[in-house]
Amino acid sequence: ATEVETKIRPQQTEPGSFLTMSVFQYMVGNTDWSVEYLQNIKLMSPESGGAPVPVAYDFDHAGMVGAPYARPAEELEMSSNRERRYRGYCIKDLSVFNPVIDHFNRVKDDIYKLYTDCKLLDEKYIKSTIRYLDEFYSTINNVKDWQKAFSYPCDKNGTGNVIIKGLKEE
């Protein structure tokens, strides 16, 4: 793959990869990203062609990380970076999330083991992270909850489509 440095709309990325990346961002509680403004996202164009794949990086503002300086962007009107907010684009047919949710459920044990099996992490942090993951899995395994969470960008009165200060070119 090669890096694409042209800004594109998130709807122009490979759909399955975008959904997986954006649900991952929701899982870790990261709102500090934008495909359109290449904020903590690299776009990779597959050698075989096709739509670019978004690759996320820089998770210091993710609620799961718990960096003491991390705060959500003011425009999002969130009380804490531990609060989750789905930042994907508006998708009316929520059934497209079903394979992504199935994927996260298949890898659940592996994700938990990243924390429970790591001897370098503080026990308090591990417990806090497991509780945070439990909340995520509780949401994605309740149809009403995940549909509400993932349809947030469709709410015209919400902050799902705000542009974070400093990203928009004047």
Image (tube, helix red, strand yellow):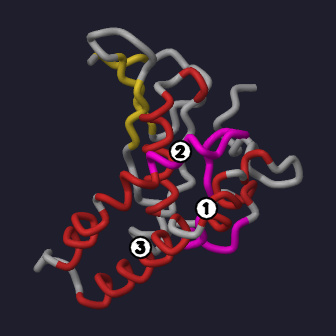
For label 2, the SS is: loop
Q: The disc labelled 2 sits on which kind of residue?
A: Trp
Determine if the magenta segment contains residue 166: no
User: Closest to the observer: 3 or 142?
Assistant: 142
Q: Are marks 3 and 1 in contact (CB under 8 Å)?
A: no
Decide: is 90 above or below 9.
below
For disc 1, the marked residue is 146
Q: Residue furthest right?
A: 157
> Residue at (70%, 67%) from the top-left corner?
78
> How far is mark 3 from mark 2, CA to CA?
20 Å
Q: Residue furthest bottom?
A: 124
For disc 3, the marked residue is 133
Which span of residues is magenta-colored? 78-100
Mark closer to the chain start, 2 or 1: 2
- Dot 2: within a 10 Å radius of its alpha carbon, few (fewer than 14), some, or many (20 or more) residues? many
- Which of label 3 and label 2 is nearer to you? 3
